[in-house]
Amino acid sequence: MTTLDHVRNKPSKSELAAQFSPELLAMYYSRLFPFDLIHEWLSYNPKNEKTTRRLFSKREFSFTIDLDGEDIYIRYQSFLKLEEFRTAILQRKPRKIDIGAIFSHAPKDKNSIAQGFKTEQRELVFDIDLTDYDEVRHCGCSGADICNRCWQMMTMAIKVMDQGLRDDFGFQHIAWFYSGRRGVHAWVCDEAARMLSNEGRGAVANYFEVSLGNDNKKNEPSLSTPLHPMVKRAMKILEPMFIEHVLPDSGHGILATKEKWLTILGTLPECAERVRENLEKKWEKAKSSPSEKWEELKKHISIFLDQQKGANKAQKRFSTSERNCLETWPVETVLRYTYPRLDINVSKMQNHLLKSPFSVHPKTGRVCVPIDVNNVESFDPFQVPTLPQLMDELDEYESKGCDDAPSAEWEKTSLKSIYQSFKTEFLEPMW
């Protein structure tokens, strides 16, 4: 399969230097970084100064700074007020900002507290990274590389996770962010989520874990039957996207060529050998599209199962395990390519750090912007604002000599709609 027709996330050293530099980062922090929005968000009740101070002042921030070409990692930073937070970032210009938990005491005083220093609350967070999909990415990408084809896997993950968190757990205030490079982060900000213990977080994360086995155990069912309602819902969401973005040559091409469809047929359980042989012969002779092959494959499995159900004892060759294995094979196949692959350790611990939204990824120069879950399919990581782009937008705006200058510099750039939407669509409904 050719990869020339899609954009790749693999800049050269010179391109990377042009996208990210200490000078560009300093300009971003001084002119465009949304200190007010982050402070408002992490205060959780900006109209109540007492609550604001209690929560924000005990929040851990972590900075990664560049010292003579070496990254220095500084944990347990905390700030009493917004201005302290702003001053620290403008002075240190961290290459990376991570956000941690709210503690019982100000994290900066950690070493002076003899006992009782502990986490009290933290958003329930999820981290999904395309590197964990390498075994099912057939677009030419691996590792940190991404393209518009494999990015669809992030779209699928967001759809499944967001609906599950809302429908099954009742959470309402969920923010999704682009990581700036090859993945997405979810921040569940409901008070009930923030107050979850480590055990509670682990239970929620484990709820979304689905064991899909591997091809070496293709004769053993991985999914239990009847299917869990969560799995059924995921299948309903994911199968149409699997057909559109995974099966054809314009996606990952797993039913687009003889070599690929032979591989897929080879994952059928041994009890379905007749199905495999019949389809190999048919597809060899008759032309059909990948989506048609998928529907035909499911139909042949269904007919074969019905025939076995009606067979007499002497003719039956199925054990209960074999039947379950074949019945769930289409679901397992779809989920193997499309189901969210969580970095579960990120979700389990209150004390785990996660990259700050609106920070800049040092490998791409892209801003970690929110993703509108209602329009997730239109999100394009390659259209996310970069540091050079934002500086150009500032220059262009100022070259026009407008008299009615906005109150904030970010209003002069493409960040305006992004920041305003985050405030009106996510922050304000929480208050």
Image: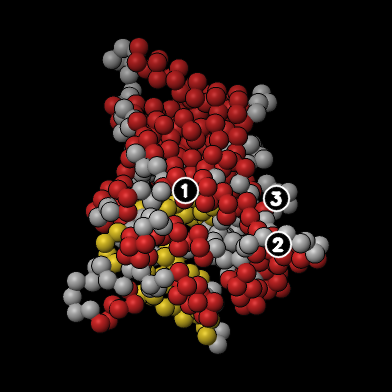
Which SS class for mark 3?
A: loop
Which SS class for mark 1?
A: helix
Query: Which residue is the site of mark 1?
Result: 428
- Comes first in the chain, label 3 or label 1: 3
**Which of the labelled discs sits on residue 405, or is there none?**
2
Query: Which residue is the site of mark 3?
Result: 6
x, y percent for residue 56:
37, 65
- Residue at the image position 73 percent from the left and 52 percent from the top: 4
x, y percent for residue 37:
50, 59
Residue at the front extreme, as displayed: 403
- The amino acid type of the residue labelled 3 equals His
- Comes first in the chain, label 1 or label 2: 2
Residue at the left extreme, as displayed: 115
**Which of the labelled discs sits on residue 99, or is there none?**
none
Horizontal side of residue 403 vs 360, given as left or right: right
- The amino acid type of the residue labelled 2 equals Ala
Horizontal side of residue 335 vs 406, given as left or right: left
The answer for how far apart the CA atoms under marks 1 and 2 are is 25 Å
Which SS class for mark 2?
A: loop
x, y percent for residue 229:
35, 30
- Residue at the image position 80 percent from the left and 64 percent from the top: 401
